[in-house]
Image (cartoon, rainbow, N blue to C red):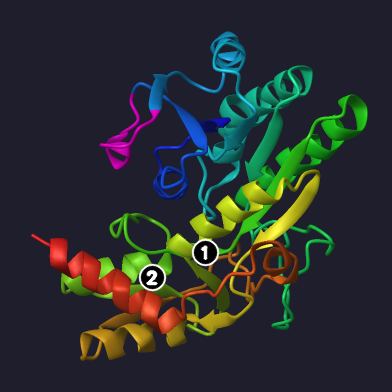
Amino acid sequence: MQNILFIGGAGYIGSSIIKHLLKEDKYSITVMEPHFANVSRLDNCDVNIVRGQLIDIDLLEMLITTKKITKVVHLVSTMVPGCNYDDYVNEFKNIIFPTIRLMQLCSRHNVQFIFFSSGGTVYGERNTTIPFKETDPLMPISYYGLSKQVIENHILFEHRVSGLEYLILRPSNPYGHGQNIYARQGLIAVAIGKVLSDDTITIWGDGNSVRDYIYIDDLAEVFKRILLSDKSNDTINIGSGIGYSIKDIIGYLENVVGKKINVEFAPSRNSDVTNMILNNERMMQIANITLTPIQEGIRMFYNYEKSIAR
Protein backbone atom coordinates (compact mmCIF):
# COMPACT_ATOMS: atom_id res chain seq x y z
CA MET A 1 0.00 0.00 0.00
CA GLN A 2 1.34 3.41 -0.99
CA ASN A 3 0.31 6.38 1.14
CA ILE A 4 0.12 9.45 -1.10
CA LEU A 5 -0.44 13.06 -0.09
CA PHE A 6 -1.89 15.30 -2.81
CA ILE A 7 -1.39 19.04 -2.38
CA GLY A 8 -4.15 20.62 -4.46
CA GLY A 9 -5.72 17.27 -5.23
CA ALA A 10 -9.30 18.52 -5.45
CA GLY A 11 -8.67 20.39 -8.70
CA TYR A 12 -9.37 19.11 -12.18
CA ILE A 13 -6.14 17.19 -12.76
CA GLY A 14 -5.70 16.01 -9.18
CA SER A 15 -9.24 14.71 -8.73
CA SER A 16 -9.12 12.90 -12.08
CA ILE A 17 -5.86 11.17 -11.12
CA ILE A 18 -7.14 10.27 -7.67
CA LYS A 19 -10.33 8.69 -9.04
CA HIS A 20 -8.18 6.68 -11.42
CA LEU A 21 -5.82 5.51 -8.68
CA LEU A 22 -8.69 4.49 -6.41
CA LYS A 23 -9.73 1.88 -8.97
CA GLU A 24 -6.66 -0.01 -7.75
CA ASP A 25 -6.48 -1.44 -4.25
CA LYS A 26 -2.94 -0.13 -3.80
CA TYR A 27 -3.27 3.46 -2.64
CA SER A 28 -4.28 5.32 0.51
CA ILE A 29 -4.82 8.94 -0.41
CA THR A 30 -4.84 12.13 1.65
CA VAL A 31 -5.71 15.47 0.07
CA MET A 32 -4.80 18.83 1.54
CA GLU A 33 -6.84 21.84 0.41
CA PRO A 34 -7.43 25.33 1.89
CA HIS A 35 -10.63 25.92 3.85
CA PHE A 36 -12.05 28.00 1.00
CA ALA A 37 -11.38 25.40 -1.71
CA ASN A 38 -14.23 23.52 -3.36
CA VAL A 39 -13.64 19.79 -2.92
CA SER A 40 -16.86 18.59 -4.56
CA ARG A 41 -14.94 16.85 -7.33
CA LEU A 42 -13.90 14.32 -4.68
CA ASP A 43 -17.43 13.60 -3.46
CA ASN A 44 -17.94 9.88 -2.85
CA CYS A 45 -14.19 9.22 -3.12
CA ASP A 46 -12.47 7.22 -0.39
CA VAL A 47 -9.93 9.89 0.50
CA ASN A 48 -8.98 11.76 3.65
CA ILE A 49 -9.46 15.50 3.10
CA VAL A 50 -7.45 17.80 5.36
CA ARG A 51 -8.02 21.54 5.40
CA GLY A 52 -4.80 23.51 5.39
CA GLN A 53 -2.44 25.53 3.25
CA LEU A 54 1.02 24.99 1.83
CA ILE A 55 2.46 27.41 4.38
CA ASP A 56 1.27 25.12 7.21
CA ILE A 57 4.59 23.28 7.43
CA ASP A 58 3.85 21.80 10.87
CA LEU A 59 0.59 20.36 9.57
CA LEU A 60 2.38 18.91 6.56
CA GLU A 61 5.01 17.26 8.73
CA MET A 62 2.32 15.82 10.98
CA LEU A 63 0.51 14.35 7.97
CA ILE A 64 3.71 12.87 6.55
CA THR A 65 4.70 11.22 9.81
CA THR A 66 1.32 10.06 11.16
CA LYS A 67 0.00 8.78 7.85
CA LYS A 68 3.36 7.32 6.82
CA ILE A 69 3.30 9.20 3.53
CA THR A 70 5.61 7.79 0.85
CA LYS A 71 4.90 10.27 -1.95
CA VAL A 72 3.80 13.91 -2.08
CA VAL A 73 2.15 15.09 -5.30
CA HIS A 74 2.31 18.87 -5.76
CA LEU A 75 -0.43 20.29 -8.00
CA VAL A 76 -1.17 23.67 -6.47
CA SER A 77 -0.68 27.03 -8.18
CA THR A 78 -2.36 30.42 -8.11
CA MET A 79 -1.28 31.36 -11.65
CA VAL A 80 -2.41 30.83 -15.24
CA PRO A 81 -0.35 31.55 -18.38
CA GLY A 82 -1.67 35.10 -18.76
CA CYS A 83 -0.72 36.23 -15.24
CA ASN A 84 1.42 39.33 -14.65
CA TYR A 85 4.35 40.31 -12.43
CA ASP A 86 2.17 41.02 -9.37
CA ASP A 87 0.71 37.53 -9.67
CA TYR A 88 4.25 36.15 -9.88
CA VAL A 89 5.24 37.95 -6.67
CA ASN A 90 2.17 36.52 -4.95
CA GLU A 91 3.07 33.03 -6.22
CA PHE A 92 6.54 33.37 -4.69
CA LYS A 93 5.09 34.23 -1.30
CA ASN A 94 2.24 31.73 -1.14
CA ILE A 95 3.46 28.85 -3.29
CA ILE A 96 7.15 28.85 -4.24
CA PHE A 97 8.76 29.58 -0.87
CA PRO A 98 6.44 27.17 1.02
CA THR A 99 7.12 24.54 -1.66
CA ILE A 100 10.85 24.80 -1.04
CA ARG A 101 10.23 24.10 2.64
CA LEU A 102 8.06 21.14 1.67
CA MET A 103 10.89 19.74 -0.46
CA GLN A 104 13.22 19.94 2.51
CA LEU A 105 10.61 18.19 4.62
CA CYS A 106 10.25 15.40 2.05
CA SER A 107 14.00 14.96 1.87
CA ARG A 108 14.25 14.70 5.64
CA HIS A 109 11.56 12.01 5.80
CA ASN A 110 12.64 10.12 2.64
CA VAL A 111 9.42 10.98 0.81
CA GLN A 112 9.34 11.23 -2.98
CA PHE A 113 8.35 14.68 -4.22
CA ILE A 114 6.30 14.64 -7.45
CA PHE A 115 5.84 18.00 -9.12
CA PHE A 116 3.36 18.75 -11.87
CA SER A 117 5.17 21.43 -13.79
CA SER A 118 4.03 22.97 -17.09
CA GLY A 119 4.64 21.23 -20.37
CA GLY A 120 4.84 24.06 -22.82
CA THR A 121 5.45 27.24 -20.90
CA VAL A 122 8.70 26.11 -19.28
CA TYR A 123 10.26 25.50 -22.68
CA GLY A 124 9.33 28.87 -24.15
CA GLU A 125 9.06 29.96 -27.76
CA ARG A 126 9.81 27.86 -30.81
CA ASN A 127 9.18 28.83 -34.44
CA THR A 128 9.07 25.24 -35.64
CA THR A 129 6.81 22.33 -34.73
CA ILE A 130 9.66 20.11 -33.57
CA PRO A 131 8.48 18.54 -30.28
CA PHE A 132 10.25 19.66 -27.11
CA LYS A 133 12.40 17.05 -25.40
CA GLU A 134 12.91 16.97 -21.65
CA THR A 135 16.57 17.85 -22.19
CA ASP A 136 15.83 21.02 -24.17
CA PRO A 137 16.74 24.37 -22.58
CA LEU A 138 14.07 26.03 -20.45
CA MET A 139 13.39 29.56 -21.69
CA PRO A 140 9.88 30.58 -20.57
CA ILE A 141 8.38 33.80 -21.88
CA SER A 142 5.59 34.09 -19.29
CA TYR A 143 5.65 34.58 -15.53
CA TYR A 144 3.60 31.40 -15.24
CA GLY A 145 6.28 29.38 -17.00
CA LEU A 146 9.00 31.11 -15.02
CA SER A 147 7.31 30.17 -11.74
CA LYS A 148 7.34 26.50 -12.78
CA GLN A 149 10.98 26.68 -13.83
CA VAL A 150 11.95 28.21 -10.48
CA ILE A 151 10.35 25.30 -8.63
CA GLU A 152 11.99 22.77 -10.96
CA ASN A 153 15.39 24.36 -10.30
CA HIS A 154 14.87 24.13 -6.55
CA ILE A 155 13.90 20.47 -6.88
CA LEU A 156 17.17 19.71 -8.68
CA PHE A 157 19.09 21.77 -6.13
CA GLU A 158 17.53 19.90 -3.21
CA HIS A 159 18.27 16.61 -4.93
CA ARG A 160 21.95 17.57 -5.20
CA VAL A 161 22.41 18.85 -1.67
CA SER A 162 20.15 16.55 0.35
CA GLY A 163 19.28 13.61 -1.88
CA LEU A 164 15.63 14.54 -2.44
CA GLU A 165 13.89 11.82 -4.42
CA TYR A 166 11.76 13.48 -7.09
CA LEU A 167 9.77 13.29 -10.30
CA ILE A 168 9.09 16.32 -12.49
CA LEU A 169 6.11 15.77 -14.77
CA ARG A 170 5.45 18.22 -17.59
CA PRO A 171 1.91 17.68 -18.92
CA SER A 172 0.69 19.27 -22.12
CA ASN A 173 -2.89 20.61 -22.27
CA PRO A 174 -5.26 18.16 -20.57
CA TYR A 175 -8.92 18.26 -21.51
CA GLY A 176 -12.05 16.21 -20.92
CA HIS A 177 -14.92 15.53 -18.55
CA GLY A 178 -14.72 17.34 -15.23
CA GLN A 179 -12.93 20.37 -16.64
CA ASN A 180 -14.51 23.77 -16.01
CA ILE A 181 -15.95 24.92 -19.34
CA TYR A 182 -16.42 28.45 -18.03
CA ALA A 183 -12.86 29.08 -16.81
CA ARG A 184 -10.16 31.40 -18.16
CA GLN A 185 -7.97 28.70 -19.69
CA GLY A 186 -8.22 25.48 -21.64
CA LEU A 187 -9.14 26.08 -25.29
CA ILE A 188 -11.22 22.94 -25.79
CA ALA A 189 -13.15 23.38 -22.55
CA VAL A 190 -13.76 27.11 -23.09
CA ALA A 191 -14.84 26.49 -26.70
CA ILE A 192 -17.35 23.86 -25.61
CA GLY A 193 -18.72 26.23 -22.97
CA LYS A 194 -19.17 28.96 -25.57
CA VAL A 195 -20.91 26.58 -27.98
CA LEU A 196 -23.34 25.35 -25.32
CA SER A 197 -24.18 28.93 -24.33
CA ASP A 198 -24.42 29.97 -28.00
CA ASP A 199 -21.70 32.56 -27.47
CA THR A 200 -18.73 33.72 -29.55
CA ILE A 201 -15.30 32.19 -29.03
CA THR A 202 -12.48 34.72 -28.72
CA ILE A 203 -9.19 33.58 -30.22
CA TRP A 204 -5.96 35.35 -29.32
CA GLY A 205 -3.89 35.73 -32.47
CA ASP A 206 -4.60 34.35 -35.93
CA GLY A 207 -5.60 30.84 -34.86
CA ASN A 208 -2.46 29.21 -36.24
CA SER A 209 -0.62 28.66 -32.94
CA VAL A 210 -0.11 24.98 -32.21
CA ARG A 211 -0.60 23.06 -28.98
CA ASP A 212 -0.33 19.50 -27.72
CA TYR A 213 -3.45 18.05 -26.06
CA ILE A 214 -3.98 14.94 -23.93
CA TYR A 215 -7.30 13.47 -22.81
CA ILE A 216 -7.64 13.56 -19.04
CA ASP A 217 -8.20 9.80 -18.65
CA ASP A 218 -5.01 9.18 -20.61
CA LEU A 219 -3.06 11.55 -18.37
CA ALA A 220 -4.39 9.78 -15.27
CA GLU A 221 -3.47 6.37 -16.69
CA VAL A 222 0.03 7.55 -17.60
CA PHE A 223 0.52 8.87 -14.06
CA LYS A 224 -0.57 5.55 -12.58
CA ARG A 225 1.82 3.62 -14.80
CA ILE A 226 4.67 5.95 -13.89
CA LEU A 227 3.94 5.29 -10.21
CA LEU A 228 3.89 1.54 -10.80
CA SER A 229 7.23 1.75 -12.61
CA ASP A 230 8.91 3.16 -9.46
CA LYS A 231 10.56 5.75 -11.66
CA SER A 232 12.51 8.34 -9.71
CA ASN A 233 14.81 11.34 -10.16
CA ASP A 234 13.66 12.03 -13.69
CA THR A 235 11.74 14.56 -15.78
CA ILE A 236 8.98 13.27 -18.04
CA ASN A 237 6.80 14.99 -20.61
CA ILE A 238 3.17 13.85 -20.62
CA GLY A 239 1.55 14.62 -23.94
CA SER A 240 0.35 13.28 -27.26
CA GLY A 241 3.44 14.24 -29.25
CA ILE A 242 1.13 15.74 -31.90
CA GLY A 243 0.35 19.41 -32.47
CA TYR A 244 -2.98 20.94 -33.41
CA SER A 245 -3.67 24.56 -34.28
CA ILE A 246 -6.51 26.52 -32.73
CA LYS A 247 -8.23 26.43 -36.12
CA ASP A 248 -7.89 22.63 -36.14
CA ILE A 249 -9.59 22.38 -32.75
CA ILE A 250 -12.44 24.67 -33.81
CA GLY A 251 -12.88 22.61 -36.97
CA TYR A 252 -13.05 19.35 -35.02
CA LEU A 253 -15.62 20.85 -32.65
CA GLU A 254 -17.68 22.08 -35.60
CA ASN A 255 -17.73 18.53 -36.95
CA VAL A 256 -19.02 17.29 -33.60
CA VAL A 257 -21.78 19.89 -33.17
CA GLY A 258 -22.68 19.88 -36.86
CA LYS A 259 -22.70 23.63 -37.37
CA LYS A 260 -20.48 26.66 -37.86
CA ILE A 261 -19.11 28.16 -34.63
CA ASN A 262 -18.98 31.90 -34.04
CA VAL A 263 -15.35 33.02 -33.67
CA GLU A 264 -13.73 36.43 -33.21
CA PHE A 265 -10.01 37.18 -33.33
CA ALA A 266 -8.13 39.40 -30.87
CA PRO A 267 -4.48 40.56 -30.85
CA SER A 268 -2.03 37.89 -29.73
CA ARG A 269 -0.61 38.04 -26.20
CA ASN A 270 3.10 38.28 -25.47
CA SER A 271 2.87 35.41 -22.97
CA ASP A 272 1.56 32.93 -25.57
CA VAL A 273 4.05 30.70 -27.36
CA THR A 274 3.60 30.01 -31.07
CA ASN A 275 4.17 26.26 -31.06
CA MET A 276 4.15 23.78 -28.20
CA ILE A 277 4.39 20.06 -28.84
CA LEU A 278 5.91 17.63 -26.35
CA ASN A 279 8.17 14.77 -27.31
CA ASN A 280 6.57 11.83 -25.49
CA GLU A 281 9.09 9.08 -26.26
CA ARG A 282 10.21 8.83 -22.63
CA MET A 283 6.59 8.71 -21.47
CA MET A 284 5.70 5.96 -23.94
CA GLN A 285 8.69 3.86 -22.90
CA ILE A 286 7.30 3.83 -19.38
CA ALA A 287 3.53 3.91 -19.92
CA ASN A 288 3.13 2.19 -23.33
CA ILE A 289 -0.41 3.55 -23.69
CA THR A 290 -2.76 3.94 -26.64
CA LEU A 291 -3.83 7.59 -26.50
CA THR A 292 -7.32 8.87 -27.27
CA PRO A 293 -7.45 10.53 -30.73
CA ILE A 294 -8.16 14.26 -30.46
CA GLN A 295 -11.37 14.06 -32.53
CA GLU A 296 -12.76 11.29 -30.32
CA GLY A 297 -11.73 13.10 -27.14
CA ILE A 298 -13.49 16.29 -28.20
CA ARG A 299 -16.59 14.29 -29.12
CA MET A 300 -16.69 12.55 -25.74
CA PHE A 301 -16.09 15.81 -23.86
CA TYR A 302 -18.80 17.70 -25.77
CA ASN A 303 -21.36 14.90 -25.43
CA TYR A 304 -20.67 14.69 -21.70
CA GLU A 305 -21.15 18.41 -21.17
CA LYS A 306 -24.25 18.47 -23.37
CA SER A 307 -25.77 15.61 -21.36
CA ILE A 308 -25.42 17.52 -18.07
CA ALA A 309 -26.24 20.99 -19.43
CA ARG A 310 -29.14 22.66 -17.68
Q: Number of callouts in the render?
A: 2
Q: Which of 103 and 108 is in front in this view?
A: 108
Q: Residues within 10 Å of mark 2 (few under 14, many from 20)?
A: many
Left or right? Give the position of 308 relative to 13: left
The residue that mark 1 highlights is 173
User: Main structural element of the magenta stretch: helix, strand or loop?
Assistant: loop
The quarter of the rendered structure image containing the C terminus is: bottom left
Q: Examine the image and state in which quarter residue 141 appears.
A: bottom right
Q: Which residue is at a point 69% across and 64% down the rendered structure image?
A: 283
CB atoms of marks 2 and 1 within 8 Å: yes
Label 1 is placed on what type of residue? Asn
* Residue of label 2: 188
Residue 297 at x, y percent in the picture: 39, 75
Highlighted magenta segment, given as a residue range: 36-47
Name the amino acid, label 2.
Ile
Q: Which residue: 39% across, 46% down?
A: 19
